[in-house]
Image (cartoon, rainbow, N blue to C red):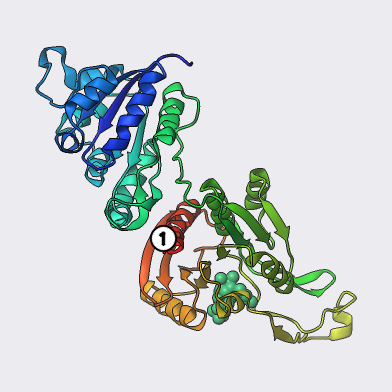
Amino acid sequence: MSQPLDIVVGVTGGIAAYKAVQVVRDLVLAGHTVRVIATESALRFVGAPTWEAISRQPLHTSLYEGVAAVRHVALGQRADVIVIAPATANTIAKLAAGMADDLLGTTVLASRAPLVLAPAMHTEMWQHPATAANIQTLRARGVSIVGPESGRLTGPDVGLGRMSEPDRIVAAVLAAGTGAAPLEPTPPRDLEGRRVLVTAGGTREPIDPVRYLGNRSSGKQGVAFALAAAARGAHVTVVAAHLDEGPAAELAAAGLATVPVETAAELAFAVQDEASAASVVIMAAAVADYTPAEVAERKIKKTERGEQLQIVLTRTRDVLGELVAHPVPGRVVVGFAAETAEDRDELVALGREKIARKPADLLVANAVGNGRGFGADDNSAVVLAASGEIVLEVSGSKRAVADAVLDRVVELLAR
Ligand code: CTP
């Protein structure tokens, strides 16, 4: 066993408190000292005798006990790691704001130890912009977030919000406490075993042996989707049109199955081959809508063509259009719309027009042009459902955008 740790387990008021009993038990059996702090509402779910018997330590609940020992800061100061499981939406909000109106709050503020949170709540609460913003704040502060996962919730409903299983939480606590792993957010494994096909980058349509018609897609957003899906447990295949160096290197380092393609026609064939086995198709690539009707066999010479050159273009296959024209039950297809919209309303209107024409399950619409979109590290998107309803608005790193969209994909898969 590694060095015994002093671990504070904070328990807040959610039904998943019963699973936290197992977390405490596993940590104690592994030889660590575990001090449990339960909030008043946590005790409504699991009582003090259980926590004391399992942790083999007195339970801590109140700011006003052990005042002589300055308990409100002492527990945090000596902890090697603090974990809060379950972490309710309310607790997450309080932590993000740095509130210290109970013993758990003072303990966290008084501590320099790594903090691990295992959120548990209903899907709507987890996805509320307030909770999402609080989680983002905590992640930016270096807090490890374990889960939540998709599955059966307390009532008859199913969705994202279920607390991770005790063994995952224990592993995250020990990694954080021993400094074994960086304090990266642990993504939920909610795409475990699913096949996800991602198209990324921009196609290039040859004009002659040295020239092509291309576009400004860097492939960053598509690669962010691929990496995010892989981190969530999916088997990922990437159909990669031209990628910039950075995303290409990231993709290569991740070792994901990659099918390189050059043109819209090659991309169409590759997607056709791979899509039948996929439960999720993410069409992030910028695919040429037109291709030269003829490719010159030899380099076009201006001495032969004079002052003007006309190139006749013909329509390419619309891969997304073909996919959504033949829907497969249980398969989720995500389309993209990069639009030169002036404002959000125009972006939404153009997105609605696109999804009405090509009824993907989700359409990720973002504004491009004037330095926005292509090649940037961040993105800002409005996500529409097939009905045209706005289901998500998200801004942040391309990875954060990918994860937020994948949360919606997981919900659709659970239906
Ligand atoms: N797409 C595709 N096959 C094409 C062109 C685009 O599958 N030949 C996909 C893209 O991967 C993206 C979505 O369709 O997910 C974009 O929709 P589209 O209506 O083609 O948008 P634009 O290419 O921007 O075209 P438009 O000029 O109609 O806005």
Quarter of the C terminus within the rendering: bottom left
Residue lying at 53% horizontally and 57% vertically, measured from the top left? 376
* Residue lying furthest left: 64
Quarter, ligand 1: bottom right
Q: Say above or below: 237 vs 301.
A: above
Residue 22 position within the rendered picture, expressed as x and y whole percent measured from the top left: 34, 30
Foreground: 234 or 365? 234
Residue lying at 45% horizontally and 30% vertically, measured from the top left? 171
Q: Is residue 365 left or right of residue 204?
A: left
The answer to which quarter of the image holds residue 347 is bottom left
Is residue 369 visible in the rendered structure shown here?
A: no
Tell me the residue that label 1 is attached to.
411
Foreground: 375 or 41? 41
Q: Would the CB of label 1 be found within 8 Å of ligand 1?
A: no
The answer to which quarter of the image holds residue 143 is top left
Q: Amino acid at mark 1?
A: Glu
Is residue 279 visible in the rendered structure shown here?
A: yes
Residue 349 position within the rendered picture, expressed as x and y whole percent measured from the top left: 40, 79
Determine whether the residue tagged by mark 1 lies in a helix, strand or loop.
Answer: helix
Residue 200 position within the rendered picture, expressed as x and y whole percent measured from the top left: 62, 61
Residue lying at 40% horizontally and 43% vertically, measured from the top left? 147
Label 1 Cα neighbours within 10 Å, binned few <14 / some 14-19 / many ≥20: some
Q: Is residue 256 left or right of residue 178?
A: right
Q: Is residue 25 left or right of residue 308?
A: left
Residue 215 position within the rendered picture, expressed as x and y whole percent measured from the top left: 64, 69
Foreground: 7 or 400? 7
